[in-house]
Amino acid sequence: MTENTLTRMDLSESVFREVGLSRNESSQLVESVLTHMSDALAAGEQVKISSFGTFSVRDKAARVGRNPKTGEEVPISPRRVLTFRPSHLMKDRVAAGNRGS
């Protein structure tokens, strides 16, 4: 992996090694999965991956924020944000990984 960051290329390489598809097929498979996930989220659907977590889109209402330097009030427009909620298994696995460091 590259500098503690998992990339598309890393995922493709893992599929290549573990599944046995060609490098090109592995790359296409990873791209296809990511495209399906992105399309579903853009359409407002949830993406739930068992034992991993749930990606969802949330609508945030307009609100008034404050510039921390000046204290000036600034309007924040309504927007859609992507959220991720990890499964309990993922939370436990991450917590166990932290203890092993």
Image (spheres, helix red, strand yellow):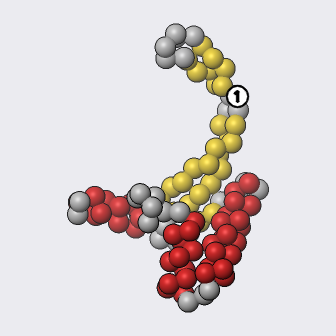
Relative depth, front residue between 98 and 78? 98
User: What amino acid type should be assigned to the residue bearing mark 1?
Assistant: Ser
Residue under the image location 74 percent in, 61 percent down: 39
Can you tell which quarter of the image residue 19 is in?
bottom right
Residue 4 in the image: x percent, y percent? Answer: 40, 58
Can you tell which quarter of the image residue 100 is in?
bottom left
| Image quarter hosting the C terminus | bottom left
Q: Quick check: 2 above or below 15? A: above
Residue under the image location 55 percent in, 80 percent down: 15
Q: Is residue 44 left or right of residue 73?
A: right
Q: Is residue 98 left or right of residue 44?
A: left
Residue under the image location 70 percent in, 72 percent down: 32
Q: Quick check: 62 above or below 29? A: above
Residue 94 in the image: x percent, y percent? Answer: 35, 61
Residue under the image location 68 percent in, 42 percent down: 80
Relative depth, front residue between 48 and 72? 72
Label 1, residues with CA under 10 Å away: few <14, some 14-19, many ≥20: few
Relative depth, front residue between 18 and 88? 18
Which residue does the numbered mark 1 point to in the structure image? 77
| Image quarter hosting the N terminus | bottom left
* Secondary structure found at label 1: loop
Q: Is residue 59 left or right of residue 71?
A: right
Residue 64 in the image: x percent, y percent? Answer: 62, 20
Residue 40 appears in the picture as rendered: no
Residue 95 appears in the picture as rendered: yes
